[in-house]
Structures are given as C-alpha cells and as structure tokens.
Image: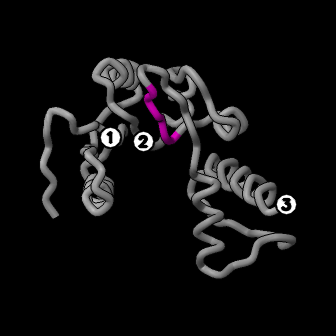
Amino acid sequence: MSQSVTGRTGLICLLGHPVAHTISPSMHNTAFALLGLDYLYMAFDVGSDTLKTAVEGLRALGARGFNLTMPDKQLMCEYCDRLSEASLLTGAVNTVVNDQGILTGYTTDGIGYMKAVAEDGFACQGKVMTMLVKNLFMVKYIVFGRFFCLMLQN
C-alpha cells in the first residue's frame, strides 16, 4: 500500500534502541493509508543519552507525536510538559502527543494488556492473576491497567 508524502504530511515516530527489528512503521503506515490520514510513521534509533536532544528536535519540527521503548519510558517523564494520570501513577510514558509544542505523555501499556486479555475471552474481574513477565517494571503498568479497566466498568 503506497502513500504519497507531501509538505503537509505529519510525522509520527518511534524512539528507541535498537529499533531496526520493529514492524511499527509498516503497521502504522498501513493503518494511516487505510484511514486516509496524512501521516508518516518512522523509527529512529535513539539511545537514552540522546533522547532529550531527539525530543527537542521533534518538538521543534512539529512532529505530531511519538512512541518510546524501554528503557526510556521513565526518562521521558522529565521531558514532557504534561503527564496523564496513568503516567503520573506509573512514572512512565510510552506515547507522547505534541499539541502545538506542548508535549503530553501517556502510558497505554497496562490498558492495552488488559484489553488484549478481554478480547481473548478472559474475564479477570474478581479473579487472581498470575503473570510471567521478563521485566518486573511491566507489572506496574499491567496492574494499573487492570485497576483503570475496573474503574471504567463501574
């Protein structure tokens, strides 16, 4: 699926290291084309040591937003102008929206996990969950996601 890039095309991207393996650009650009959205999604190999400079550059360029990978989700909190309630509670950001130079950080990991569990037909409400995770920090995102999903149901 081909999409024409013009002077009006908005930039959205992934920041992380390494990113050469990611399928995010293909996935997002296909979605943009199917939805008729004039955006281009790219992946940039950015380490923690250059994250601040990259974020300042994206803000200056007017990039519409970006996603982050570990280990920079916590560090990104320092570079946002505003944080969502979820990011304040978890101390992490995986999605940043740029509204005319104001960077707002969000975390969607926990909620995304809980939605995936529900879509697979598992009812978690009132049940004990056992999770095998590689990164214990992810548990905080998932627990918050479960808490948030339960709040939405009530």
Tell me which corner region of the image, top left, top right, bottom left or bottom right, holds residue 69. Answer: top left
Going from the N terminus, do you reach mark 1 or mark 2 first?
Answer: 1
The residue at the point 24 percent across, 49 percent down is 20
Q: Which residue is mark 1?
A: 13
Quadrant of image for the N terminus = bottom left
Which element carries disc 3, helix, strand or loop?
loop
Q: Nearer the viewer, residue 146 or 61?
A: 61
Looking at the image, do the residues carrying marks 1 and 2 touch, with CB atoms under 8 Å apart?
Answer: yes
* Mark 1: amino acid: Cys
Q: Which residue is mark 2?
A: 67
Residue 106: image location, x then y, percent: 57, 39
Which element carries disc 1, helix, strand or loop?
strand
Which region shows up in magenta?
94-99
Left of 117 or right of it: where is 63? Answer: left
Left of 106 or right of it: where is 44? Answer: left
Residue 35: image location, x then y, percent: 32, 59
Q: Main secondary structure of the magenta part?
A: strand
* Mark 2: amino acid: Asn
Report the disc number at residue 154.
Answer: 3
